[in-house]
Amino acid sequence: MDAHALKRSALRLLAALALCAGLAALALLALSVENSATFSRWLPWILLSSICGVLALGALLTRKLWQLYRDYRNHVPGSRLAMRTVWIFGSLVIAPLVIVYLFSLDFINRGIDSWFRVEIKQGLNDAVGLSRAALDLRLREQARRTESLARALRTLSGPALLTRLDEERRAAEAQEIIVYDADSRAVAISSPTPLLQPPAPPAPEVTLQVFGGRSYVSLDPLANGRYTITTAAPIDVHPHRPPTRYVLINYAVPTELSELAEGVQRTASQYGDLSAVREPLKVSFRLTLTLVVLLTLLGAIYGAIFSAQRLTRPVQDLIAGTRAVGKGDFGTRLPLPSRDEMGFLVHSFNDMTKRLRRASEEAARSRAAVERERERLSIILSRLSTGVIVTDSELTLYAANASAGTILGAQLLEAVGSTLESVRKPAADPDATRASGADARLSAFVGALRERLTGSQLEWREQLTLPSDSGERVLLWAGTRLPDERARAMIVIVFDDITALLAAQREAAWGEVARRLAHEIKNPLTPIQLSAERLRRKLLPAMNAEDTVLLERATHTIVQQVDAMKQMVNAFSEYARAPDMKLACFNLNQLVSEVVELYRLQDASAEIRVDLDARLPEIEADRGRVRQILANLITNGIEALAGQSGGCVQISTVLQSLGEASTALISVRDNGPGFRREILGRMFDPYVTGKPRGTGLGLAIIKRIVEEHGGRIEAENVPTGGARVQVFLPVGAQDRALLMAAERRMELRRERA
Amino acid sequence: MAASLKMTSARPGRLCAPWLAALLLCMLVPCLPVASAQAQGPLDGNFQIDSAYIVLDHDVLELNARIHYPDNERIRNALQDGITLGIDVEVAIERPRRFWFDATLLDSTLRRELTYHAVTGRYVVRNEANVEQHSYATLNEALEQLGHIDDLPILVQSQLGPGPWQVAVRAGVSRGRMPAALRALMFWTDDWHRLSGWYTWMLTL
């Protein structure tokens, strides 16, 4: 048993002891109050029960009061109500109890004192005196009669003496008459009944008196409440010697007189005894009354505290339960105190918490479902290549996915909650060019969005062209209003970058054009060239000099133009031709060095700088085609620097990761005039060139070679001047597979978009 | 048959008569000075058992004792004021035991009352049941008579069992007819209560 249970058991035992002691005291008092003898016999038990009850109650009450005071000081809920209730109950009980107690004390004092008033004592003394006087009269009369009889007996003896004694006994109605000799032996007896044994010698006081020559008379009380008068007188009187005979007579006092005298005696005796116990009686009554009143008082106060605590306990439980509910604990169940109004209140509270718990569980399930849906949606949105943002008419960003930030070139995820206009460039991008391009792109997007939102049509689907450093970016964007009860309309905007898709479509179209051109144009070129040479060969000998010159110039022009057209058709054929890749592992840095060295030997007009990454491993690619890429890019750079002093072409290789794939980044940068802005977005399209004599197929072919390797190519202007083309080639077959798979996914998403 | 041997103030293994009330009052007023009833008050005077012995008469043990009761003017006045004096003679026979409480073979009290009969002016001695009563002209005579206990049958020999037997006799004077509870209540102020010492001896038959 732990200490708490032990303490509780001790308290219960103490309470039971107090209750039993109090009840026992009251019961004993009630049973004995009618009988003083019983009261006297039970008084110790009444006192013991009362004292035990008072002590036990005092201990319990002290503990309860201390608890009440402590709770009051600590502002325990309900303690003030309990204190007030105890105060009211206590006042209601104490005041009448004190009044009754004081009144009873006074009543007891007055009552007991009234028993011993002087008049009563005097009356008793008078009654005793009167009784004694009445009896004295009879005593004197019997004494005289005895003396007279003694004188009459002086001369008698023998039968005459007996006869005289009998006569006298009958005449005086005496009980017996005995004549003793000097040795107190009975010599003659007159008795109404014969004696079985000789009479006892008279008391010494009798003989002492009689032998002194004097008469004796006494009045003796008997055990049966009667009185007897004993008289004695000497028969023979001699001056200087004791009498030889004396007579002793016992007279019975009349019954009526005896009863009256005995009544007076009994009353006097009882009064004396009562007088002796006067003070103890007062003390006992006071003590008993005090203990009983104290017991009642303590019991009442304890009951008041108990009732107050019992009354406030449901209130405390309710307060605690309300606080628990306030903190979200809907599982709080309060014990039902009773079937009264408080019980109804507690029952209502329990019912409320039950409903709240059900509602809370339902809400939790709903929240969990919403959370799951949100996570699912978040995963879907994060995996979407399509950009999704949710905003309102004030352009406050409520939601965005990663693709939206990627497409718009902004940190939209971090900007949720703020306005789109406050979104800045990606902080991690060290390249100011990209940052400014992203800003322009986002600004254009925001401008277009604001324009849309200011109109009445909040649902649209169309293409949007945004400026970019790498050319224009074409978005397919759609907006729709979300059903929402808020004042400001929530708009969800879905957009996708279809620039690559459009480029692919153009590329496919150009590939088809190139294939048809190669097929339709290349075939008649050779007969044209052969026919022109045949005309020249057949006609030239037969013609004069003037015609010869003309024919020579015409056929030369035809052959020359046909060659030019062949070159162009071959270029188209090259563009459209599906390559046969010859993959092999080689050192890219070594290949770059070889190609650069070749150009350094051929053309020294531009400086070629090389920065190769020593960490770059061997890559798996078609070495010839990679050489073609390098040659074309270096050629373009050198041609862009034509006529410019201080021109420099920088070639660098870097091992870089694209997603999970490792790529070799080949960057070719010049400090020339850069790409013209109008062709910046279409530089990889066929027949788009910034050079006066370019075919416009160089970058298109490079792009196709790069894509055949699963890589990626980017072209852009450098803010400090010049252009930069970056080629990402997968390092190994696995990297190539990863990049191609990613590209296919992107392609599918673009197609879906 | 047996001579008096010794007197002691208390008999071991026994409680005083008003133990319960004394316990109560000790709880109530633990600090009150408890006055000895044997030393001061109206019962002051020579109060002792002069001699006591037991005789065996026809298999009946009979007590004989000579007791000297105090006699003074206050007692006389109190009696004449109407109070009753209780005169008790307590006799006990025990068998001492070594490892346990002594076995009580007899614990008897001879109760008598001494009153002053105001109507007749005599001192009356009566026994507890009021079946026997004697009156005396003087208090001295009455006390003298009370102090003589002759051939008081107390026990049949067969009830004694095996010995040894220790006999203890004690006399007491108290204000009679006062309820025991009240007497106990006033035990620290009631000087009308006095006990003699125990008169004990080993009984041999």
Image: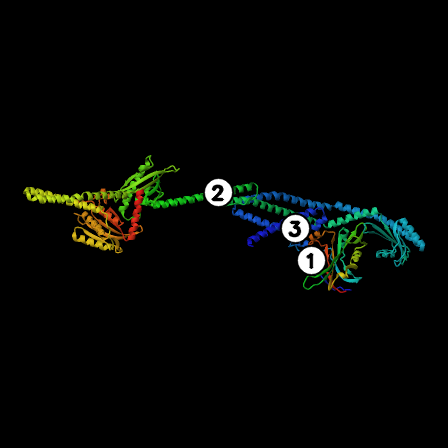
The answer for which chain carries disc 3 is A
Neighbourhood count class around disc 1 (C-alpha, 10 Å): few under 14, some 14–19, many 20 upward: few
The CA span between labels 3 and 2 is 54 Å
The image quarter containing residue A501 is: top left
The image quarter containing residue A560 is: top left
B163, above or below A340, in the image: below
Task: Name the N-terminal-most of marks 3 and 2.
Answer: 3
- Helix, strand or loop under label 3: helix
Q: x and y percent of residue A233 in the render?
A: 88, 54
The answer for which chain carries disc 2 is A
- Using the rendered image, report if marks 1 and 3 lie on a common chain: no
Task: Compare residues A356 and B55 and report the one nearer the observer.
Answer: A356
Task: Compare residues A431 and A677 and report the one nearer the observer.
Answer: A677
Amino acid under label 1?
Leu
Would you name the residue on which mark 1 appears?
A: B15
Would you name the residue on which mark 2 appears?
A: A356
Amino acid under label 2?
Leu
Whether residue A529 is visible to the viewer of this picture, yes or no, is yes
Task: Compare residues A50 and A644 and report the one nearer the observer.
Answer: A644
Would you name the residue on which mark 3 appears?
A: A49
The CA span between labels 1 and 3 is 21 Å
- Helix, strand or loop under label 2: helix
Q: x and y percent of residue A92 in the render?
A: 60, 42
- Using the rendered image, report if marks 3 and 2 lie on a common chain: yes
The answer for which chain carries disc 1 is B
Viewer-nearest of labels 2 and 1?
2
Do labels 1 and 3 touch, CB within 8 Å? no
- Helix, strand or loop under label 1: loop
Do labels 3 and 2 touch, CB within 8 Å? no
Q: x and y percent of residue B133 in the render?
A: 80, 53
Amino acid under label 3?
Ser
